[in-house]
Amino acid sequence: MKKKFNAAKATLLTAVVLGGVLVTLLPTASAGLIFNFQSVLNVTWENETQEPLVPRGELRILTLVITHTIARGTLGEGLLVSLTGALIEIDVSILEKPSWCTATISQGTLAVTVQPNEISTVETTVTIQVANDAPAYELGYVKIRAAAEKTGVIDGYDNDFTLSFVPGYLALINPSLPETNSKNIGPMDTAVFPIEITNLGNARTVVLLSVLSVPNDWVALITDHLILEEGAGSKATAFLIIKPSKSFGYHNEEQTIRVSLQPVKADDYSQKGEVTFQTFLVQSRGFSTPGFETIVFFGAFAVVFLLVASVRKRKK
């Protein structure tokens, strides 16, 4: 029995030595055809890509897990043992991505060693970020390639895979005042303030506007909502109208009117952006005279008074 075992062992060693000699003497291509060695890669990733990626700063980091094995033909079993420890480089690169997305590989060059009948594992990470103009809730893709380099008689191999993700909604507006935020008017006049609003978000947006407080005897009205079409640079103009107190007499008043603006997704009001505020200052100075109806009242009163006085005079 021992003699048989030693004979088998000697045969195996002889095969390995002969294989090594063949690898040395034969051209690499010929040896590869005889033993049929080839790297095989499989790529999986950890962490989720399905949660929407909020534009303007959020980073999504995914861990790529790459496994490596070596496929071989029937004649390659013995020779593979002699290749134990050989280094095989694996390159990871990004092939395609949307223009509104950035994607980076933390470590693009990895390495594994030949381990017969074992699976080697290496890891790297890919970081994905979307820009402000990423279309909200439109499916995006990043195509990545993992490639094992040809090493000696071991043929190379590459595996392409795709990561999918969805950009979230960015509620972002930029209000500006094309004229001013303060005016001096008379108590009988009206102050009109245009408010130009630009859509900096990535979807059709509704802007809700409201006046927060109005001084006693003053009137303040504002466009209650505006629709901003999708696309950076889309603009619309709201108007704030302020009428000061016009009670009879001289006025020298200064009042502040504050308004709020809030962007929301046009087809889903539950997705809201931050509330911003604009402040307007109006100074009312001057004399307020009675209106036409007041003049008519006092005129009619005067006529009645004169008629009564005339009747009494005649009676006397």
Image: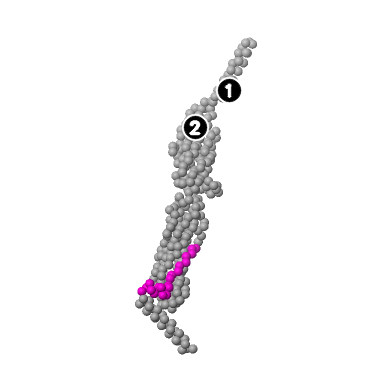
| Residue 173 visible somewhere in the drawing | no
Q: Exactly how many numbered labels are in the figure? A: 2
Question: Seen in the image, is 216 located left or right of residue 12?
Answer: right
Please determine whether, in this image, residue 55 is positioned above or below residue 303.
Answer: below
* Nearest the eye: 24 or 290: 24
Q: Residue at x 52, y 44 (%)?
A: 206
How far from the left and from the top, in percent, is residue 153? 39, 73
Quarter the C terminus occupies: top right
Residue 85 painted magenta = no
| Residue 40 painted magenta | yes
Tell me the residue at 42%/59% (across/down): 95
Q: Secondary structure at mark 1?
A: helix
Q: Nearer the viewer, residue 237 or 281?
A: 237
Identify the residue under disc 2.
190
Neighbour class for label 2 at 10 Å: few (<14), some, many (≥20)?
A: some
The span picked out in magenta is 27-46
Residue sitting nearer the eye, 13 or 240: 13
